[in-house]
Amino acid sequence: MDNMNLTLKIWRQKDQSSKGQMVDYKVTDISEHMSFLEMMDVLNEQLVNSGEEPVAFDHDCREGICGMCSLYINGEAHGPDRGITTCQLHMRMFNDGDTITIEPWRAAAFPVIKDLVVDRMAFERIQQAGGYISVNTSGNTQDANSLPISKIAADEAMDAAACIGCGACVASCKNSSAMLFVGAKVSQYALLPQGQVEATERVKNMVAQMDLEGFGNCTNTGACEVECPKGISLDNIARMNREFMKANVKG
Amino acid sequence: MALDSKVPEGPIKDKWTDYKNHIDLVNPANKRNIDIIVVGTGLAGGSAAATLAELGYNVKAFAYQDSPRRAHSIAAQGGINAAKNYQGDGDSNYRLFYDTVKGGDYRSREANVHRLAEVSGNIIDQCVAQGVPFARDYGGLLDNRSFGGVLVSRTFYAKGQTGQQLLLGAYSAMNRQIARGKIEMFNRHEMLDVVKVGGKARGIIARNLITGEIERHSAHAVVIATGGYGNVYFLSTNAMGSNATAAWKIHKKGAYFANPCYTQIHPTCIPRSGDYQSKLTLMSESLRNDGRIWVPAKLEDAKAIQQGKLKPTDIAEADRDYYLERRYPAFGNLVPRDVASRAAKERCDAGYGVNATGEAVYLDFAFAIDRYGKEQAKIHGIKDASAAKIYELGQAIVEAKYGNLFQMYEKIVDENPYKTPMMIYPATHYTMGGVWVDYNLMTTVEGLYCIGEANFSDHGANRLGASALMQGLADGYFVLPYTIGDYLSHDIRTGKIPTDTPEFDAVEKEVKDRIDFFINNKGTKSVDYFHKRLGKVMWDKVGMSRNAKGLTEAMAEIKAIREEFWKEVKVPGTANEMNPELEKAGRVADFLELGELFAKDALNREESCGGHFREESVELDGEQKGEAKRDDVNYAYVAAWEYKGEPADAVLHKEELEFKDIELKQRSYK
């Protein structure tokens, strides 16, 4: 395939208090083997060289695990491919002459900091509310093998723990709900015996914080699961709901 | 200043225990009056911050990302070593100690490595208690895999994302302390310098990356846990933001920098595809457990593959060169990383590379799929299983083990690695060198500590797979919390450190002046332009294979790039806003100095050891002909460099390494 020429429509916003707008840019000679963010690098190099301010976007590991990158591309979180983050999206998913719309995550709980960078501190506060097991870190715990855990439970906990906290679920949800994220975090601990001791308090506190942050409700649309780069399953939301009901029955 | 490693007396197996029994402690009430700054929140910084806070100290933690969970430890895939001997295959603390010293090519400090091995088992206990979902067998006990350079299975793992799960464990411990108010977390903040008062580290100057505000933070001790300097090569497996600024800034303020030339070039990375490439992606070397590495045995076949005329599956078994199995029959595909990387470079330099750039070798899973398939057929009692059935059963096992790595590969390269061999090539991955620390993990500046990849101590000249996670967590959970207490026990009457002092004024001014310079310079070239040029010099002349001529040239070339950078660099925007170009400018300015010291260190070390290969120092004959040749008579020392204004003027201090418990041997994996 020959290299591509593309039109980019990108959200530009100076800072949190300024009003933003979509701005058009052209990039040329883009290889299909480039990653999406390498294409953004090309644009930014072009902007720097022409004396304009480059586009700010979050990114770090560029291998799909840190959860930093967060672009809403052509109306989809992390763009048109599935099971990947924006940094793993490759330009072979696009065609010469395409116009690509690039926006930040849109959610009341994720205010824009600059251009495509959003503030995800709400996720931090939810985890601080209970996303841990209260063991001390002295190392004087029991031997790791003194507590057998069924392989199935360990594997399921691992699947829930695969969440990278990027926020694509919130951005994809028409209600800006964080249920998939919180469900995954609650589930990891709910599935393991170590997590049982504090299960009641954990789910209540995390859900309360989630509500406080202004995330919306879940209406079972399932867009979050489709756009999740790590394939976090809707089962986690169901499990969280069960945990939450159990916790409320216990009081 | 003479280097004092402060290694305790006594037999090696008792040193750490005796040390802990005799250090000064700080009582809980006094801990509340002591502040500690931790910079970096990866495995080392995260676990240290959580543990220090839990002990009762007031911790201020800093990360340039928007969450501690995003530090690049998150990307470690394969696993974490611990001498649990759950497999009953003869493992012990001593063996882990021995393997690490040997793997490090006898250039690490024995006492530190032994301590690392001693606490390794505790790490696993700790992480399981935190809810880290390690892989388990059907009996519900923890599973292990084997890793390069060793003969036992001691690696614990969580699918292909062990680093993420361990970091989430440390992060959850941090969250618990953040909620209690014992850790004050500064996300999106970057440390730009350290502040010394009366010779002791007493604070830092940091920039708020959202507002651009320059902040002063004081503490009784400062801990640097900011990772390695692999991005000096521009292309590496590090995160885009990974940088050496904190480590380099403390070096310029008096911390010696040790063994910068010890860099690990990881053998199993996805090859480069073009000039636009921004980073390289590593695939866990656990893949080498089941993958076989080869190139075509005939040059004409290699040429045809490079031109796209032949596929790997077209090459007959007899025409393949499994060069690691050929050269190193005892370890085969599981030789240590430096050996595997150089062997790949040797084949590719000879013209046998297997992609368009000629810089790639195959990693083939066809045999593993077949082997596992037959095993599964037997387990499930399937008689006379068809080839297709065997393939299906085998693929399922390979998928369960490496599924996410295969998916990652396919997304990047657009080829299915179950059907066709993967292509791999070495890439810069980890830096064994770093800030010099003593047994207490303290640098040559009092009250200034350095842990994890940022320090130099445990891996010698080469790190074994699955040992980085072990060292980061050992330092943070189990070593630093003891050693720093011994130091802070003398600070219980000091009181809060004020920030409105001339010392803070002076350092803040330096930081602000530099930022103003960048903003006002109005040069002609972007930061990346200079970073890429530096990276090319480093890769070509200070990469996998080095010689005196190239290193001398590299020093001059890096100096020239640095001088041009300060004249011509262009940073758009202002200082008082989120400004990623400004952040990069500061980091690249530091890499442009570090790179020169790196080359100087490599030039000084006229031996081949671990990740440092000098073409002048190879075995000339015998079974080991052409292999790296170490020089224990002249170079069994740690090279710790003192800053003197220009990297080229750095002064060498030697810490002679003593090996009382392990006999120095030439490494052989034959």
Image (tube, coloured by chain):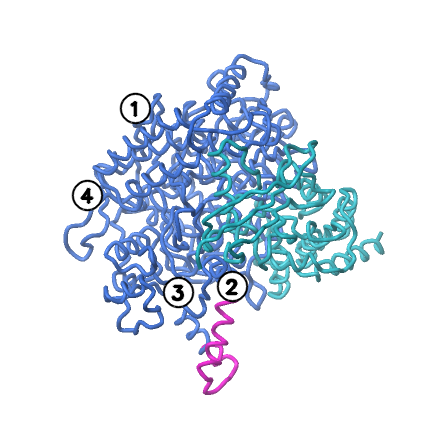
The local secondary structure at tag 3 comes to: loop
Identity of the amino acid at label 1?
Asp
Q: Which residue is mark 3?
A: B291
> Of the residues under marks 1 and 4, which one precedes in the sequence?
4
What percent of the width, then of the height, locates residue B245?
46, 31
What percent of the width, then of the height, locates residue A53?
54, 33
Chain painted cyan: A
Q: Is residue B130 visible?
A: yes
Q: Which residue is mark 1?
A: B649
Residue B485 versus residue A91 in the image, above or below: above
Q: Residues within 10 Å of mark 2 (few under 14, many from 20)?
A: some
> Of the residues under marks 3 and 2, which one precedes in the sequence?
3
Left-right relation of B1 to A173: left
**Which corner quadrant of the image does residue B68 belong to?**
top right
Q: Is residue A129 magenta?
A: no
> Of the residues under marks 1 and 2, which one precedes in the sequence?
2
Total marks in image: 4
Question: Distance between the Cα atoms at labels 1 and 2?
Answer: 50 Å
Q: Magenta stretch: give its range.
A: B375-402
Q: Is residue B384 magenta?
A: yes
B25 vs A195, nearest the viewer:
A195
Question: Distance between the Cα atoms at labels 1 and 4?
Answer: 24 Å
> Of the residues under marks 3 and 1, which one precedes in the sequence?
3
